[in-house]
Structures are given as C-alpha cells and as structure tokens.
Amino acid sequence: MFITTAGFKHPSVSILNTKKRLAFTNCKPCWPKHAAMADLIPFPLHSRTRLIRSIVDDLKVVHGPAANIFWRERIAGIVAEMRRAGLADDAIRSEILGLQDAVQIELQGSYLHQQRDGTA
C-alpha cells in the first residue's frame, strides 16, 4: 500500500514502515492531525449554481438592511441543514465563505453584463 504525503493510502503500491506501525483504513487519514481532512462535502456550496443564482436573483431586488436580513436568514437556514448533516463547524465556515465568494462573483458578473448591454 502506498501512503501519500497527505497521509492517505493508495491500494496499488505496498510500502513497509519499519520504524513505527500505523493502522490504516481505506481513504481515511493515517494521522490524527489529518482527521479534519476526512470531512466529505459531496456538493460544495460554491458549486451549486441554482442556489447561487437564486440568492443573486433575490439580492438584485432587495437592498440595504433588508438585503442584510435576507442574507443572514438564508445562511442561517443553510448552516442549520449542514449541522443536521453532521458537518464540523470549520467545514461549515469554509463552505459559507466559498458560497459568499461565489455569490459576489455572480453579482459582479451580472452587473457587468447589464452595463455591457446598457440595461443597468
């Protein structure tokens, strides 16, 4: 079995560690410091196009304090779903920051597209 530098094993090659024996499980971290790497995000928020566009469409018509309230409520719902799914707080935080970046990029792209078309 081959152990990658990230501490994961690959079943196609065998390596013997003579200094210390480690217990492995398939595709899980070998060392405790890599335990956080075992969280699996099957559908990352920043890749959910429908979710991003839905949020952007709503933010185009809601402005000021109402937009802030909308964003906080929407994110609170997403965070609650992720917690129910058992994700760690660090993974949730990372996902929310990625979603925020994706929404900002989509908003900027939408604004630039409107400027180009003269509809802004």
Image (cartoon, rainbow, N blue to C red):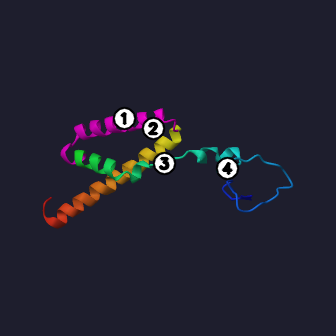
The residue to which callout 4 is attached is: 26
Mark 1 surroundings: few (<14), some (14-19) or many (≥20) residues within 10 A: few
Farthest-out residue, right: 18
Mark 4 or mark 3: which comes first in sequence?
A: 4
Distance of label 3 from label 1 (alpha carbons): 18 Å
What is the magenta range? Answer: 59-87
Q: Position of residue 101 (x, y in %)?
A: 38, 52
User: Image check: 114 left or right of 35?
Assistant: left
Q: Main secondary structure of the magenta part?
A: helix
Mark 3 or mark 1: which comes first in sequence?
A: 3
Mark 4 or mark 1: which comes first in sequence?
A: 4
Q: Which amino acid is tagged 2?
A: Met
Q: Kindly check if marks 3 and 1 are in contact, taking CB atoms under 8 A apart as contact.
A: no
Identify the residue at horizontal 78%, vertical 48% (top origin). 22
The residue to which callout 3 is attached is: 42
Up-down: is 26 above or below 116? Answer: above
Mark 3 or mark 2: which comes first in sequence?
A: 3
The quadrant where residue 117 appears? bottom left
Farthest-out residue, left: 119
Distance of label 4 from label 3 (alpha carbons): 18 Å
Q: Position of residue 73 (x, y in %)?
A: 32, 35
Q: Which amino acid is tagged 1?
A: Gly
The residue to which callout 2 is attached is: 82
User: Image check: 39 left or right of 104?
Assistant: right
Identify the residue at horizontal 42%, vertical 47% (top origin). 97
Could you tell me which secondary element the residue under label 4 belongs to?
loop
For the residue pair 77 and 64, the one nearer the viewer reads as 77
